[in-house]
Amino acid sequence: MSNKLKIIPLGGLGEVGKNMMAYEFDGQILVVDAGLMFPENDMIGVDYIIPDFEYLYDKSHQVVGIIITHGHEDHIGAIHHVVPRVPAPIFGTQLTLGLVEVKLARNGLASKAELRRINAGESVQIGPFRVEFFHVCHSIPDAVGLGITTPAGLVVHTGDYKFDHTPIDNWPTDYAKLAEFSQRGVDLLLSDSTNAERPGWTPSERVIGPALDEIIKNAPGRVIVATFASLIARMQQVADAAVRHRRKLAFVGTSMVDNAKMARKLGYLLVPDETLVTVETALKLPPEQVVLMCTGSQGEPSSIIGRLSAGTNRQFDLLPTDTVVLSSHPIPGNEETISKTINRMLRLGANVIYDSIAPVHVSGHASQEEQKLMLNLVRPKYFMPIHGELRQLKRHAWLAEQMGLPKENIVVVENGQVVELEDGKLTVGERIPGGYVFVEGGAIGDADPDVMREREQLARSGIFIVNLSIDKYTNRLLENPEIITRGFVSNEDAETLIPLVRKRVIDVIHNGGLDMQKDIVDVVKTYLYNETRRKPMVFVTLTKV
Amino acid sequence: MSNKLKIIPLGGLGEVGKNMMAYEFDGQILVVDAGLMFPENDMIGVDYIIPDFEYLYDKSHQVVGIIITHGHEDHIGAIHHVVPRVPAPIFGTQLTLGLVEVKLARNGLASKAELRRINAGESVQIGPFRVEFFHVCHSIPDAVGLGITTPAGLVVHTGDYKFDHTPIDNWPTDYAKLAEFSQRGVDLLLSDSTNAERPGWTPSERVIGPALDEIIKNAPGRVIVATFASLIARMQQVADAAVRHRRKLAFVGTSMVDNAKMARKLGYLLVPDETLVTVETALKLPPEQVVLMCTGSQGEPSSIIGRLSAGTNRQFDLLPTDTVVLSSHPIPGNEETISKTINRMLRLGANVIYDSIAPVHVSGHASQEEQKLMLNLVRPKYFMPIHGELRQLKRHAWLAEQMGLPKENIVVVENGQVVELEDGKLTVGERIPGGYVFVEGGAIGDADPDVMREREQLARSGIFIVNLSIDKYTNRLLENPEIITRGFVSNEDAETLIPLVRKRVIDVIHNGGLDMQKDIVDVVKTYLYNETRRKPMVFVTLTKV
C-alpha cells in the first residue's frame, strides 16, 4: 500500500479549491464541498458555474464521503449536480445539512442522498480518512474546518474562516483544537486566502449590529435589507433590530424564505413568532413598522433589489420613503452593476445605505493578521494557500514566507494541479484535465469556448442576413433580396442602408462569378464596414430554384 | 437683457458634468472640457463614449470659448469630435494645450483649432464671462479651476482637484485665490465629487516616490510601470527613480511616447537625455538596467500590459524576472479585467505589484476632508456637486449639509438638467434631451439603446437561422431546409439537433397553416428550448417560388 495522499483542487481558473476539493488515499476519495461560482462578465448567457468533477465520474464508487464545510452557495450550490453522479454519504453539521436539504428538495432530489450529521469537535472515520471537525467562525453559523489524518500525515483544511472574538452566536473559532493539532505536528495546512491582500484583522460580525439598529430606528418608512440568502448571521442581526424597534420582519423571495425557515426550525435563527410576518401582511402595515429582507445585494437584474431599482417588481414598488440597506460587499466583477443599481434607487428617491456609508457589512474571511495567527497556531511543515485567485494565493504565500516558513515548503498551485504528500514530503504531481461547467437555464455542461467566442462576436456588432432566391439556369434574381439585421445599427440607419446594400448585392449577381455566395458576403462586409466602421456577422442564404 | 446664467452638464447617465459642461449667459456659451468616458461592461462593441453635445450644434456660433481644465482623457478626449463642429477658441494652460495639440494632430486636425494659452492666476474675458483661472493640484501638472463671473454672480468650478501639500511639482492648490473668492462672495460652487465616499484626506502624490524607489532599486530584472498615458506626474516619479538607480527609461506605445515628448518639450517632465532611450535600445540592454513605462493599467486587452499578459505582444514578451507595477486604481467596472490580467502575469512568473501590495498609486481627487475644506474656503451660497455618479453627488451633498449649508441651497442634478442662477437665486430649469454618443471604430453616434439590447439578446443564446424555399402553388418544400447557427450550442450538439429541427420544420410545412413563417418560428423556438433550455434568436427566411 502506497503511503501517498493526493490533494486535488477541482475546477478551472478562479478561486483554487473554493468550490470543490478531493483528497485521495489508497484509491479512496474524500470530497470536500460542492459549490458554485457566479459567471464573469464575459461569460454571456451563463447562469452559474460548477466545478468540473469529471475526474470523479469513473471513480464515483471510490468516493467514501462528501463533506460540506458550511452552507454558503459557493460550498453547497452544486450539490444537486453531484448527488446524481456520486452516490456517497454527505457529512455536515446540522445547519449545513438543513441547507443542503433545502437545495436538494428544490431540485427534486429530496431523500436521494444519505445525509450524515456531524458536530464540531467530533472525529469520524471516513474510509482511510480520520476527520476531526472543528468549529470556525464565518458569516454563517455551524461552519467547520477539518483535521484529516491518514498514514501520510495530518492535514488541516481551514475552510472559510475568520477569528471573530465576539461572533453573533458567541461561538469563537476552536483555538484549542488548532493548538492541539500543532502539538501533534501538522504536515500540511490549507488555509483560506480570500482576504490575503487585506492588512489587519477583519472586524467582528458584531460591529454591524449598532449600524443596523441605528438605521432601523431612524428610518422614516420601510427598511429593505438586501443580502445573500445564506447569510443566516445577518438575518439574526436584522431580526434583533426589528424586535428592538417593534417592527415586523418579512423575508421576501423563495431562497430567503426557505433558508430562514430551515434555520429557525433548527434553532439557528431566533425570531419571535409575533415579529415574523409574510410579505403580504407586511405590505398592508404602516411602512414605519416594517423591515423586509431579500436578496439582490449584488445588483442582479433578476433579484428583488434589481427589479425594485428598475421598477419591474410585481409585488411592490420602491417608495421614496424606503431605506434600502445593501448588507454585503461587491463580489469582484459586480461593482459596476451594484453601482448602477444604487444610482437607480437613489433616482427613485429612496435612501440607500451601503458599506462605504455605514458599517452594514463585514467580511466573513480572515485578514492578514488572522492568517498569520492561523499559521502560528497550526505551525505546519508545509503550507498550501487555497480559496483565492493566484493573486491572493501568492500574497498568502508571501505572508507565510515573512513568518519564516521556508519558501520550498510553500506550494502555490491552481485548480487541476494535484499535490502529493508522501513520507513527510510534499510534491507537485500530475495535472488533471478539466475546467468549469457552465450552467445555462436547465442545460449544463455544453457551452464550449467556441460558442462563447461566437456569442461575443454576435454581440460586438450584430448580424446582417441576406436571403436570395435565384433562377438556377439564368442566375437571375427571382425576388428582391430580403435583408434582416439585429444589433447592428438603429432602425433609422438601417432604412437608409438596406436599399444601398440591396443594390450592391444585385450588382454582384448581375456580374456573375464562380462563388456568388462568397462574393456577396465579401461585398456586403466591405460596404458595411466602409459606411459604418462596423463588422457585423454577415450571412447570405441563397436558394437556387 | 436677462440676468440669467444657465449651467448645463452635458452627457447621459454617468458622472455629472465630468466630460463636458456649458455655461450660457445672454445667448453666449462657454464650454468647459471635452472629454471621453470608457464604455461600461454591457456596452458591447463600444470603444469609447463622448458626451452628446447636440445642444451646441445649432448654437455653435454662440460658443465664445472652450476651456479645458487639464489634460486627462476624460477632459480632452473628445476634443477632436468637438473642433469640427464648434469653431471657438480653446483655452488652456501650456501643458493642457500641448496635450490637446497631440490629440488634434493624431486626428488630422493640427492647426484646425485656435489655441489660446492662459496661465493660472490670470483673468480672461471670454464673451460675457470673466474667467479667473486658479491652480489646482491633480495627478497631472498645470490643472486649473475656474472662477466665472457674469452679471448673474460668481461661480466657482473646481475641476478635478486635491489639496496636496507636497505635490511633485511643488505647486499647491491656490488657497489664497479660493479665500479671495469667498471674500467677494461666491454664489455657487461646483465641486469634484469623485471621492465623496472616501473618508479622510487623499495622500500626497509624493508618497508614491519611496515605494517606486524601493521597487526599482530591488527588482532583479526589468521594471515595467503601467499607468495612464496622461499621468505626467507619475512619469516624473518613475524617471526620478530610474535616474537614482542608474537605469535607462523607455516609454512604450504611441500615446505615452507622444505625451512624454510634449511634456518634456514644455518643461513639465524632466528626464536627462542620457536616461531616456527608445524601447528598441532598452530591449538590448541588460534587464536590470531597464525601466519601461507603458499603458494598460486597466487591463485593456489591446494595451501593452494586456498583450504581455496574454503572450501576444509583438515587440517583447514578459520575462519571469520582470517586475510589473500597476500604478493606477481600477476604474469602477474594470476590477475583474484587471484581476485576470494580474493573475495571468503571475502565472507567467513575473512579480506584479499593485496598490494593495505597495503604495504605487494615490488618487488625484479630494477625499471628504478636502471636500469640506473646499466648502469652508469658498463658503458658497449655493452648492452643486459635480464629477460623480448620483451616489457620490448625494454623498457630497450630505457632507455639505453636515457642515450647515441649508438643504434647499444644495442642488443635485444629473446630466442634461439645466440649473439657472438669476438674481442671486438658484433654480432647476428645463431638461435638455441627449445622452451619450458611442464611438465604435471610426463610426460615431448611431448605436442606440435598441441596438444594444439586441446585441445582448444575440449574445445571450446565439442565433438560429432556417432558410426555406417553397413552391408558391403547392406549398411544397423545394429543397431541404438550410440551417445556420452561431453562439448557440457546440458543433457536436448542433449536428445532433439540426436534423431533428429540420424534421419538425418539414412537419409544419406539411400541415400547412395560415402564417407558416410564424408557425415555424414558434415550433423551432419551443423545440430548441425543450431540448436545450436556451432561447436563441430564431430567424426563418422563406422564399416562395
Image (tube, coloured by chain):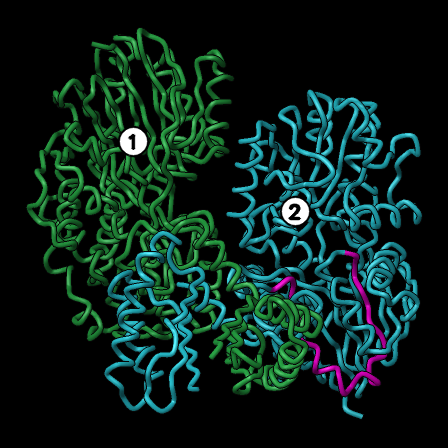
Chain colours: A cyan, B green
Residue A245 occupies quadrant: top right
Q: Quadrant of the N terminus of chain A?
A: bottom right
Q: Where residue A363 is drawn, which disc sits there?
A: 2
Chain name for mark 2: A
Q: CA distance from mark 1 to mark 2?
A: 40 Å
| Image point (31%, 57%), residue name | A496
Q: Position of residue A27 (x, y in %)?
A: 79, 88
Tags 1 and 2 both on a single chain: no
| Image point (69%, 74%), residue name | B531
* Camera-side residue of B135 and B302: B302
Q: Amino acid at mark 1?
A: Met
Q: Amino acid at mark 2?
A: Ser
Q: Secondary structure at mark 1?
A: strand
Q: Is residue A54 magenta?
A: yes
Q: Is residue B306 magenta?
A: no
1 and 2 marks in contact (CB < 8 Å): no
Q: Is residue A259 left or right of residue B185?
A: right
Q: Where residue A305 is drawn, which disc sits there?
A: none
Q: Position of residue A328 (x, y in %)?
A: 65, 44
Magenta-tinted stretch: A46-71
Q: Where residue B21 is drawn, which disc sits there?
A: 1
Q: Is residue A255 left or right of residue B270?
A: right
Residue A239 occupies quadrant: top right
Closer to the eye: label 1 or 2: 1
Q: Relative to A328, is A192 above or below?
A: below
| Image point (26%, 81%), residue name | A510
Q: Position of residue B74 (x, y in %)?
A: 30, 43
| Image point (79%, 68%), residue name | A80
